[in-house]
Amino acid sequence: MAVEVRELECFLVLADELHFGRTAERLYLSQSRVSQLLQSLERRIGGPLFERTSRRVALTPLGKEFLTSLRPAYAALERVVEGAREYAANTKGKLRIGFQGTANDDILGAVSGFQSRNPNCLIDVCEIPLNDPFGALRHGELDAAVVLLPVAEDDLVVGPIFSRQPQTLAVCTRHRLADRASIDVEDLAGETLIAFAGPAPNYWRQAQAPTQTPGGALIHRGPDVKTLQEGLSLIAADRGGMIICRPTAALNNRAGITTVPLTGIPESALALIWRRGEDTPSVKAFAEHLKGA
């Protein structure tokens, strides 16, 4: 039979007071209602929890055993309810999240789902430069950002990692590798890759446009760009290739450019990041939501 929380509460107060009148006063109930709740609980359990006489109320051995088990369980239930109350109270206001480039359907779906579950927390979504994944976050313009990995910054926390995707090489349709079914990263030896200019750290720019293959062969560095669209224009002009993930390639399909599956390098992946020490309730809630999205 389903347990009634009111019955448990009545039992715990009566175990403290050992007096029906004082128990009724604390619970804002009549003494007859206290008796009804206790009798209902005893029927559920199958035995008496109190010895009741005209002079005294005392716990039975069964009641003492039940009290010992119930107190920590009831306290844990109260903590769960209090935690949910604090969550609802604190997950509010505005949460400013930045995205490199265009947010894909998975990310937008996660944002929409979080917004539905937390109507008091308004998410403000904005685009951040592809060549500067950390600047807006560090300047306090954002609460969190979704960026391309890798991230190895001491002042930033890397939260949930998601959207792992295969890599492709985007090249001009006239490029010597354009007709290949797939290529290995070692096939990039001697090729030119368009790189990102700007304040992004070198390790991050190397991950997006390496200057040598894992085997040590040289990859030429092509023109620097600040946006993906700039890079695509240079690709169409056969100024070099770019490593981009498969969904981004499909989203930015255009004449004069083809993409070839690329193996031998890590998958593309996104992560939610925020400033160390500034994981607000809203940021933590959104990070937990992304984990389950």
Image (cartoon, grey):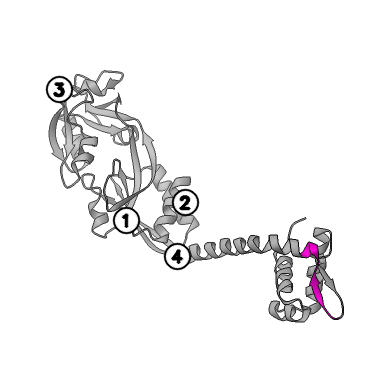
Alpha-carbon distance for marks 3 and 4? 54 Å
Residue 210 image label = none
43 in relation to 262, above or below: below
* Residue 272 image point, x, y percent: 35, 48
Instruction: Answer whether residue 293 is visible to the viewer in this image.
Output: no
* Residue 233 image point, x, y percent: 18, 35
Q: Mark 4 or 2, which is nearer the eye? A: 4
In the rendered image, which quarter is residue 165 located in?
A: top left
Comparing 282 with 222, the one in front is 282
- Give the residue number, with chain letter if any, for mark 3: 190
* Residue 253 image point, x, y percent: 29, 32
- Give the residue number, with chain letter if any, for mark 2: 113
In the displayed structure image, the side of residue 63 where residue 204 appears, left or right: left
In the displayed structure image, the side of residue 79 where residue 34 appears, left or right: right
Alpha-carbon distance for marks 1 and 2? 26 Å
98 in relation to 119, above or below: above
Query: Residue placed at 23% from the left, 40% from the top?
Result: 204
In the displayed structure image, the side of residue 125 where residue 189 appears, left or right: left
**Amino acid marked by disc 2:** Gly
Q: Mark 4 or mark 2, which has the lower sequence index?
A: 4
> What are the residue bounds of the magenta stretch?
55-63
- Give the residue number, with chain letter if any, for mark 1: 276
In this rendering, the count of numbered labels is: 4
Q: Mark 3 or mark 4, which has the lower sequence index?
A: 4
Q: Mark 1 or 2, which is nearer the eye? A: 1
**Amino acid marked by disc 4:** Asn
Instruction: Answer whether residue 57 is visible to the viewer in this image.
Output: yes
User: Judging from the image, what secondary structure is the residue with disc 3 in?
Assistant: loop
- Queried whether the magenta region covers residue 61, the answer comes back as yes
